[in-house]
Amino acid sequence: MIRNMLRLMLLWAILLVSSAQAVPKGQGFSFAVIGQLAGGSDAGLHDALRQAGHSDFIVVNGLRPRSEACGDGMYQRRKHLLEESGKAVVIALAARDWAECRSESGESAAQERLNHLRGLLFDGDHAARTKKLPLVRQSAAARFRDHPENASWEHHRILFATINLPSNNNHYLSAAGRNYEFEDRLVSNRAWLQRLFSQAKRHKMRAIVLFADANPLVVPMRANNRPEKRDGFAEVRKQLQTLAARFPGRILLVHGQPSSSGIVWRDNLGTLGAGRGRISVTVVPAASNMFRLERSLK
């Protein structure tokens, strides 16, 4: 009899653990992130969008394949692909979209390309096309009307947002007097992060998910494997760590850099690299293990 009682107790314990780990139907959702696809073809992007069709929304980290020039035609073509997909798609700008672009004479075309993309990709028509996913853009504030690429949206009591952090050392230029763009964006990003965390705390959000090209928590390195003389992410890194320490929920930073580690947590601040390919993340807001990397196609 004692043996039977022990068996019943063991079975009951297993059932308790199973029920705690189970995900009740309808309480979770998923999102996908498309990074720089191998080959960078339009067909590859089309397939990635189709395969991510089950997701509640899709974040595309960068439009331009490095194999193509930064011409207007390429941006128009890629924009058309996203529109024709019929899905809730959000664009997170990458360094290859603008910061790495050069003119035919070899001079930097970063500022001109960034201005062009801001008008092309984030206009009023784009806002109407993403009505499935109501976005709030930083440009809604008069002071930051030139920064529409920073956008946020809420989903199941989680705050999602894009932030323009290019991977080329945050586009900091070593030449004196050439960092107006960097300094301007530094101010806007500082205000954007402050606004996001204040909003999340005020509305008691369970978590914040940020989408960016770079991983600002990592010190940028030069080609000779030495740290950059001027760390272009120093300010945003310090701010993120400070804000995270004061936030009661979790913060997940999804960046466009390669990573083989899945989601890496340090206290309540986690990082996930999309790299080259497509990743899918399942979110169960009420679970202790809120974010789960379901699939990674490189």
Image: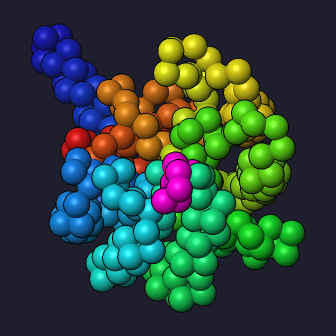
Q: Residue at x 85, y 75 (%)?
A: 142
In the image, 242: left or right of 28? right
Residue 166 location in percent, x, y? Answer: 57, 46
In the image, 103: left or right of 219? left
Q: Residue at x 44, y 57 (%)?
A: 62
- Residue 100 covered by magenta stretch: yes
Q: Residue at x 19, y 27 (%)?
A: 11
- Residue 23 covered by magenta stretch: no
Residue 249 location in percent, x, y? Answer: 63, 41
Camera-nearest residue between 17 and 187: 187
Residue 133 location in percent, x, y? Answer: 50, 75
- Quarter occupied by the N terminus: top left
Camera-nearest residue between 91 and 74: 74
- Count up the numbered dots: 0
Residue 40 location in percent, x, y? Answer: 26, 55
In the image, 70: left or right of 152? left
Q: Main secondary structure of the magenta part?
A: loop
Q: Residue furthest top?
A: 2
Q: Which residues are magenta?
A: 99-106
- Quarter occupied by the C terminus: top left
Q: Residue at x 54, y 40 (%)?
A: 167
Camera-nearest residue between 107 and 26: 107
Seen in the picture, residue 247 relative to 32 is either above or below; the reply is above
Seen in the picture, residue 187 relative to 269 is either above or below; the reply is below
